[in-house]
Image (cartoon, rainbow, N blue to C red):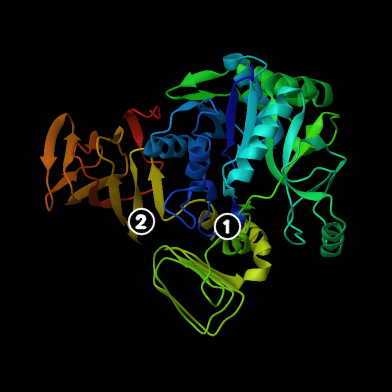
Amino acid sequence: MTPVTVPLILAGGQGTRLWPMSRAARPKQFLPLMGPTSLFQRTLERVNNDRYAPAVVITNSEYRFLVGEQAAELGIPLTSVLLEPVARNTAVAIAASAAFVASRFGADALLHVLPSDHEVDADAGYWIAVDEAIRAAATGQLVTFGIKPGHAETGFGYIKSNATVGGSAQRVERFIEKPDAARATQMLDEGGYFWNSGMFMLGAGTFLNEAERLAPETHRAAQESVRAAREDLDFVRLEEASFAQAPNISVDYAIFEKTDRAAVVAVEFPWSDLGSWDAVWKSGNGDEAGNVVQGAVTLSDVSSSLVISDHAHVAVHGLEDVAVIATNDAIFVGRLSEAQKVGEMVKRLRADKATTTLTEIHRTAYRPWGGYASVLNGDRFQVKRLFVKPGKKLSLQKHHHRAEHWVVVRGTAEVTVDGVNTILSENQSIYLPLGCTHRLANPGKIELELIEVQTGSYLGEDDIIRIEDEFGRA
């Protein structure tokens, strides 16, 4: 009997090469890039079928509510959400997940490891490859999916093998680091080389045995972090001290390049890691001039370009091979063919105190109850737009340095001030004096929207004393 197959979705990356849309607080896997749902949600939908048990997601603790909310929006159940206490790359993330899955489903359970930020067209060839990978992993092979290259790509690692598309899993002859253009062209001409997709199929017990043999520090850190993990609402927090002892190393370096169990299933389905803006452009539906646009955009005499706006109307004239990405607080403009260099730009922005926040947070910040957007800042005052989902409420809290005024724009607000409840409708307002204990809730069936005016000597987000909180933040 074929063992249970558990999808393992890796959702902890920060996606800096898709700045300014992707930032540390809301990276690319949670963004609706070129579609109504996020990449993470499309990954969840892909594994929501009878081949699989409910997915396990491993992510950064900062993203736990994004994971929960986006899964809930689709109505897709999860086995669990594992929270990484510190960033330590994919080797220990997969090892800890394997240990967790083995404890829940048994050591013979299979893991289908999937990055949450890839664009995949799950055609018939995709599912043929998945079923072959399941068969191979059930016999003790550690399987990677190798994408048949369509062009000489320098942004991916490669796998050498005699595998054929549609055929059985074959032994990996060797892994090749990201090549230069000449080497990539040579490999494309020779054949027998595949892009390393970062997707795997592996037995939990087999992988853990290989980790113990080839990467004992990673294995020990993973096992101990799972053994000492604790439940927190709908999440499992891996124990920090143990997890932090793991080397910061990828699963390719730690395991796959050393093991004699590595096999590859060759595939040719449409796939992109969306690792740069030119990859987004290639995966989009271009017009006759080769332009891909999203949002409020007007083009004139423009070709082979990507233009995205989530706020202002962007008009572009007389350009070719350009990427224009506009958000409400930052705009990137550069050659589309040099989009891989965005990561270097982000490093420069992060190193400068004046711009570091542009790499970390959006002007719109998302919270498990909804979120807020900064509208206007001034000396001793700040204006925000708050939105609260139906049935959600903020923490019971108070501030030491600011007072607040709330004006309801849409929906119904239930406001608690020092134990007194008040219901507010559209165009009604309330004053929250400095130091009062207060809470905002949305008892209605539509999203609550209001304007918040803060006044005081200090308006930082850390001036919040939480007394009660349904999301475990008090």
Residue at image coords 59%, 74%: 304
Q: Are marks 2 and 1 in contact (CB under 8 Å)?
A: no
Circle 1 residue: 18
Residue type (three-letter) at the residue carrying disc 1:
Leu
- Packing grade of label 1 (10 A; few <14, some 14-19, many >=20) is many
Task: Indicate whether 450 appears above or below 331.
Answer: above
**Secondary element type, mark 1:** helix
Residue 32, position as x, y percentages in the image: 46, 52
**Secondary element type, mark 2:** strand
Q: Is residue 316 visible?
A: yes
Earlier-in-chain disc, 2 versus 1: 1
Residue 4, position as x, y percentages in the image: 59, 21
Residue at image coords 12%, 37%: 422
Tell me, for residue 385, which label it has, or none. none
Would you say 215 lies left or right of 11 here?
Answer: right
Q: Quadrant of the N terminus?
A: top right
Task: Indicate whether 58 appears above or below 98.
Answer: below
Q: Is residue 249 visible?
A: no
Circle 2 residue: 374
Answer with the quarter of the image where residue 351 lies.
bottom right
- Packing grade of label 2 (10 A; few <14, some 14-19, many >=20) is some
Residue at image coords 69%, 35%: 200
Residue at image coords 47%, 42%: 41
Residue 164, position as x, y percentages in the image: 78, 45
Residue 202, position as x, y percentages in the image: 70, 28
